[in-house]
Amino acid sequence: MKPGRLIAVVGPSGVGKDSVMRGINEVLPQSHLVRRVITRAPELGGEVYDPVTVPEFQAMARDGAFVVHWGAHGLHYGIPVSVRYQLNKGTDCLANFSRGALTAGADAFDNFLVLNIIASPKTLASRLAARGRETPDEIAKRLAQAVKPLPQGLNVITLSNDGDLSQTVARAVSALQPASV
Ligand SMILES: Nc1ncnc2c1ncn2[C@@H]1O[C@H](COP(=O)(O)OP(=O)(O)O)[C@@H](O)[C@H]1O
Ligand SMILES: O=P(O)(O)OC[C@H]1O[C@H](OP(=O)(O)OP(=O)(O)O)[C@H](O)[C@@H]1O
């Protein structure tokens, strides 16, 4: 059986990673949305995640519960090893990823594809304010990190999400089909 693709969805805060992932999953319900483990307070919204404390996260990392994990925005994020079960049965998996962890991701997954979502600074600022999950101070810090180069040598699809979400999703679905990696 051909393994599924780990589709790492990256881009600056507020660009629409979670929204685009959810939209792709609605059109392609056979895909799997990876549920991340995050040291974020429970039920802050924006994505479905498994909230844990920092000591819990550290113990999980020590016990090998994550394929890849990273730190950003004062939080810890982990991609649980259960994703391998989905990939091994041929399911494409969509994971909200970190640009800073792409090299580790490419090392960890055989079939690794990057979906790089971009938008203008103005769009990012208004989307983060509308989302309302972070404080204004946290939003300013996230906007300051909007520009980050991607590592060379990866299989990357870049899409703008400045326009309608449904259009971005349609372009993403068409770029992902048929499987190109
Ligand atoms: N194309 C779009 N048009 C309008 N609003 C959008 C679009 N894409 C996402 N949003 C909104 O922007 C905010 C940030 O989106 P989100 O998916 O949380 O981004 P990210 O995961 O990249 O931080 C959310 O409130 C979401 O509903
Ligand atoms: O290395 P970077 O590409 O800058 O990414 C750093 C982190 O930012 C995002 O987190 P999160 O989903 O908490 O924030 P966001 O929704 O505001 O993007 C992303 O999922 C990474 O975990």
Image (cartoon, grey):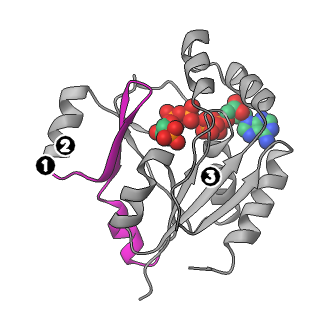
Q: What residue did someone put label 2 on?
A: 60
Q: What residue did someone put label 1 on?
A: 63
Tell me if 41 is positioned left or right of 53 in this view: right
Q: Respond yes or no on whether mark 3 lies under 8 Å from ligand 1.
A: yes
Q: Residue at x 26, y 26 (%)?
A: 53
SS at circle 3 = helix
First reached walking from the N terminus: tag 3 or tag 2? 3
Tell me if 26 is positioned left or right of 77 in this view: right
- Give how far apart the Cα atoms at labels 3 and 2 are: 26 Å
Q: What residue did someone put label 3 on?
A: 21
Magenta span covers which residues?
63-90
Q: Is residue 105 visible?
A: yes
- The amino acid type found where label 3 is placed reads Met
Tell me if 114 is positioned left or right of 174 in this view: left
Q: Quadrant of the C terminus?
A: bottom right
First reached walking from the N terminus: tag 1 or tag 3? 3
Q: Is residue 48 visible?
A: no
Residue 6 drawn at (x, y percent): 47, 65
Disc 1 packing (10 Å; few <14; some 14–19; many ≥20): few
